[in-house]
Image (spheres, rainbow, N blue to C red):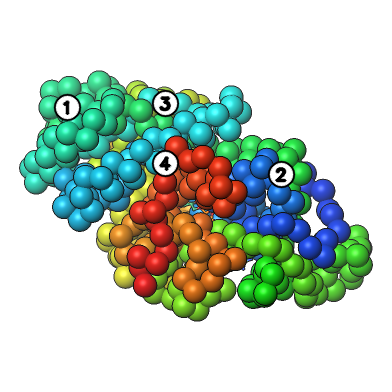
Amino acid sequence: MNTTGLSFWQRTCELPPIPERELPRAVDVCVIGGGYAGLTSALFLARAGMTVCLFERDTCGLRASGRSAGHLMQGTSEFPNRAVELWGETKLKAVWDIHRSNNELVRELAGDSCGYQRKGNVYLATSRDEYLELRESFSVLQRLGVKGVRFIESGELSALLGPGARRGMFEGGLIAGEDATIHPMKYVARLVQLCLAAGVRIYQHADVTEIRETEGGVELVVQGVGGREQGSDESDRSKIKNQKSKITAELAVVCVNAYASQIFPALEGVVIPSRGQMLATSSVNVAIPRGLAHCANFLYEYWHARESGELVLGGFRWTSESAELGTYDDTVLNTEIARGLRSYAHELYPELPEDSVEHEWTGIMGITSDGLPMVGPLPGKFRIWLNLGFSCHGLSTATKTSQLLTNYLLEQPMDLNIEHFAPSRLF
Ligand SMILES: Cc1cc2nc3c(=O)[nH]c(=O)nc-3n(C[C@H](O)[C@H](O)[C@H](O)COP(=O)(O)OP(=O)(O)OC[C@H]3O[C@@H](n4cnc5c(N)ncnc54)[C@H](O)[C@@H]3O)c2cc1C
């Protein structure tokens, strides 16, 4: 059993070596955060000709981006029948379009090295109420012209769940056929490789403690980067850990997700940390369709089987929601949730061997009140941009928002727009 606090993904993938570089005095853009949002922002900005430094407090992908379920979804946290009431058709369609385009972009960037599989995502109805809401959602999606979506009655479910699944657990479902799965940490590693090739200077163990707007740009205080005095022996390293350096840039792009209020106290209560929990089994000989994503119980539970035979499954946050809110600790498990996940895995697939769970982990999401990210200038500032608050959908959204943000900043043509994600909507 893995007791390191790392995810299955982090234990099955290593980052490429990141060369140590001197800290320059000034660059065009500083990006803060080394998850999907930070790495893709840095990548697109560097490819557009900007000089970019990326600062990551730990190592790239050590937080939520290396701990997700690996589902690339078009949908949002709210079912379409509810989202259309809240947002209207135009906004709902715009968000689904961003997710669809994100999926395509991730596929392009990931290439063949990240286990990307486009097999779809089945939304399963656990109750009659959920069945009716999925039916209504299907009508909404048809009206919006969303492609690849199909409604499924219970008789058709066994093929989608696999012969190894318990019969009769679900009333029916909806399949979003263009959704995909990926090894999320291999995607992070691939992004690091692409960033380095594009000339991004990546600094790990570099904590940005202050970001200040100045007359012509921004000034950052970074702790943990040695600059010109960078050394290689232990005593040099411990000096460097506490060393503070300054760097200036024309713009800061802040991609720290759940940790936003630690830099900007005004974001306290706007982006709320919320812990999710998952498990992964060993490679099992149970008939579960590989690479097809599943979710049930209004998206609270989610799982898929890897090509290599492991089942990854998450959820049960609802059993102790309040305990999972407001914490930044992703090194511990919630034992009640762990029990719930293990027994749900066996309920779904009764043939799973008793001792097959090999990994359990948690990860911290940054939740906003409408479940949509904040992409745009920090209210009241011009040169500090946010790309964060991805709630439960950062893998499904952040690569595209980073591309759109880059195009917007550099006044390049945009195929979709980010107006629905303006941070000002939440103040
Ligand atoms: C259990 C679980 C399952 C999930 N499943 C899915 C899924 O299937 N599909 C999906 O789309 N989404 C999923 N998500 C959500 C997704 O993982 C997140 O939305 C996404 O990883 C956010 O990426 P990010 O780059 O914004 O944040 P992060 O990956 O959290 O990266 C932010 C980085 O900023 C760094 N940082 C913070 N403060 C500072 C600072 N001051 N200085 C320097 N660096 C700093 C952090 O160390 C961190 O590495 C899941 C999340 C969890 C926890």
Residue 289 horizontal/vertical position (percent) = 36, 24
Residue pictured at 63% horizontal, 63% vertical? 252
Camera-side mark, 1 or 2: 2
Q: Return the residue at label 1.
A: 152
Give the residue pinned by disc 3: 118
Contact between marks 4 and 3 (CB within 8 A): the answer is: no
CA distance for labels 3 and 1? 19 Å
Query: In the rendered structure, which amino acid carries the disc numbered 2?
Result: Gly
Q: Give the residue type that dot 3 points to.
A: Arg
Of labels 1 and 4, earlier in sequence is 1
Which residue was labeled with disc 4? 416
Disc 2 and disc 3: Cα gap in Å? 32 Å
Amino acid of disc 4 = Leu
Q: Residues within 10 Å of mark 1 (few under 14, many from 20)?
A: many
Q: Is mark 3 within 8 Å of ligand 1?
A: no
Find residue 164 and report its image quarter: top left
Between 159 and 53, the residue placed more toward the observer is 53
Q: How far apart, in angstroms, are the residues tagged by discs 1 and 2?
A: 48 Å
Marks counted in the figure total: 4
The residue pinned by badge 2 equals 49
Dot 2 crowding, Cα within 10 Å, few <14, some 14–19, many 20+: few
Image position of 214 (left or right of 345): right
